[in-house]
């Protein structure tokens, strides 16, 4: 579907939308506020999975000139996905899904859990040498951050074993920068608010740092470190996932993946767009530059997609990061029961208790509709359906 140029009263910049339904007043207000920022570059690009966030919509792509908005990046800096295609067909999994799930849960700490001691890959990570340069408010958290490197977290984070339409097995996971990313983000968001007269901003959550200032330099340093931490976090978990998979199904031998993808969907990058270098914040969106691999997951009972970007300039070379929520976690807990969860995740080896009802497929948008609405942004490489899902 081609984008629409939204007509929102009071908006001061264009809003290009790949969403195919009318937006709520709250969503319109949020977009209007972003459009009024003096640092906004060109327009706001709204992906088809967009929904309400804090300050700006999840699923929005915001390019800024000589400025970055820390609350728009959010507190899970570098959150994203990683996937590996194995050379094995589905038959190897027969009768072993439950054992595989339990082995994954024993290998990768989930929820609030962490490794008892930092794993070897964490100890060897080169960027710990920079920890002393980060915001002074996190200096007492290094040991915890080291133990959390290689852990999943909770909420919508997951580890999955999936099958594609040709019955090849894929390993996939979703996580970010854990507690240390949250701590860094929270401190910089508060700093940004102190630099502005909040009543002069469209929304206090849109307080920004201006390039060239010490505050910008400090945030940019910590942001890049946290994004690197998130990438490494996914790499370590995938290594441990592959270890368990190979131990169970490949005599402990390694295999050469045909496709490996590791991509952020909550981050900032400095990029060239329309002839200018700008800061692109993808808040629940991924890089869909021409030929770029990406991952667009559904919910824990729905399909996911491996894609290649088409390099659509109007979207700032971006696409959606998933299905997107259609109701809040609180609303989902009120609306759905344990029985609903069991029915909607039929055929998936996963938790089916009240603790994950807020992640029920019915709380998310239709992933097929989301994909149809961004056919001009991405090319589908593989369609996946999970058979194992591990959540925090």
Image (spheres, rainbow, N blue to C red):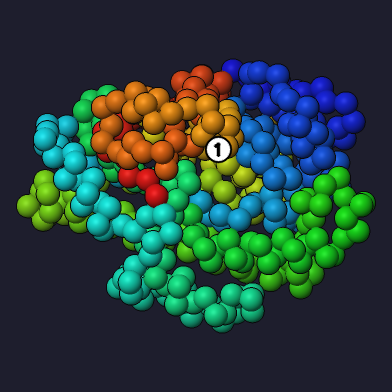
Query: How far across and how far down the image is residue 63, in percent?
Result: 71, 45
Q: Residue furthest left?
A: 251
User: Picture quarter containing residue 219?
Assistant: bottom right
User: Quick one: quadrant of the N terminus?
Assistant: top right
- What secondary structure is marked by label 1? helix
Residue appearing at x 44%, y 35% in the figure: 357
228 sits to left or right of 47? left
Residue appearing at x 70%, y 19% in the figure: 22
User: How many numbered circles are shown?
Assistant: 1
Density class for disc 1 (Cα within 10 Å; few <14, some 14-19, many ≥20) is some
* Residue 306 visible within the image: no
Residue receiving disc 1: 329
Residue appearing at x 76%, y 32% in the figure: 26
User: Picture quarter containing residue 143?
Assistant: bottom left
151 sits to left or right of 281? left
Frontmost residue, 344 versus 135: 344
240 sits to left or right of 34? left
Residue 290 lies, with reference to residue 70, above or below; the image says above
Query: How far across and how far down the image is residue 388, in percent?
Result: 27, 38
3 sits to left or right of 382? right
Residue 195 lies, with reference to residue 321, above or below; the image says below
Query: How far across and how far down the image is residue 3, in percent?
Result: 66, 22
User: Picture quarter containing residue 96?
Assistant: top left
Residue 17 lies, with reference to residue 202, above or below; the image says above
* Residue 339 visible within the image: yes
Query: How far across and how far down the image is residue 255, in percent?
Result: 17, 50
């Amino acid at each position: 579907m081609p984008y629409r140029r939204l007509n929102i009263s009071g908006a001061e910049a264009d809003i290009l939308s790949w969403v195919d339904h009318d937006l709520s007043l709250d969503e319109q207000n949020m977009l209007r506020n972003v459009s009024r920022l003096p640092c906004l570059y060109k327009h706001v690009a709204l992906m088809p999975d967009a929904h309400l966030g804090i300050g700006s919509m999840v699923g929005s792509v915001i390019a800024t000139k000589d400025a970055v908005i820390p609350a728009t990046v959010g507190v899970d800096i570098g959150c994203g996905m990683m996937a590996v295609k194995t050379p094995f067909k589905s038959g190897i999994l027969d009768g072993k899904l439950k054992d595989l799930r339990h082995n994954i849960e024993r290998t990768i700490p989930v929820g609030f859990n962490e490794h008892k001691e930092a794993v070897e890959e964490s100890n060897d990570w080169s960027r710990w040498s920079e920890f002393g340069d980060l915001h002074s408010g996190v200096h007492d958290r290094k040991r915890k951050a080291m133990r959390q490197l290689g852990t999943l977290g909770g909420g919508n984070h997951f580890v999955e074993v999936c099958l594609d339409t040709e019955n090849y097995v894929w390993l996939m996971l979703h996580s970010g920068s854990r507690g240390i990313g949250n701590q860094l983000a929270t401190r910089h968001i508060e700093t940004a608010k102190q630099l502005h007269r909040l009543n002069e901003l469209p929304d206090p959550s849109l307080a920004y740092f201006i390039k060239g200032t010490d505050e910008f330099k400090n945030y940019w340093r910590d942001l890049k470190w946290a994004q690197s931490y998130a990438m490494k976090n996914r790499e370590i978990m995938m290594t441990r996932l592959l270890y368990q998979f190979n131990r169970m199904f490949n005599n402990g031998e390694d295999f050469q993946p045909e496709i490996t993808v590791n991509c952020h969907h909550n981050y900032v990058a400095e990029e060239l767009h329309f002839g200018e270098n700008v800061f692109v914040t993808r808040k629940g969106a991924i890089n869909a530059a021409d030929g770029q691999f990406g991952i667009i997951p559904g919910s824990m009972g729905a399909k996911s997609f491996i894609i290649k970007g088409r390099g659509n300039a109007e979207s700032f070379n971006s696409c959606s990061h998933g299905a997107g929520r259609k109701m809040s976690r609180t609303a989902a807990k009120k609306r759905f029961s344990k029985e609903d969860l069991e029915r909607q995740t039929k055929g998936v080896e996963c938790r089916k208790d009240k603790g994950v009802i807020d992640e029920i497929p019915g709380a998310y948008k239709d992933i097929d509709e989301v994909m149809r609405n961004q056919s001009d942004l991405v090319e589908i490489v593989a369609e996946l359906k999970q058979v194992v899902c591990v959540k925090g």
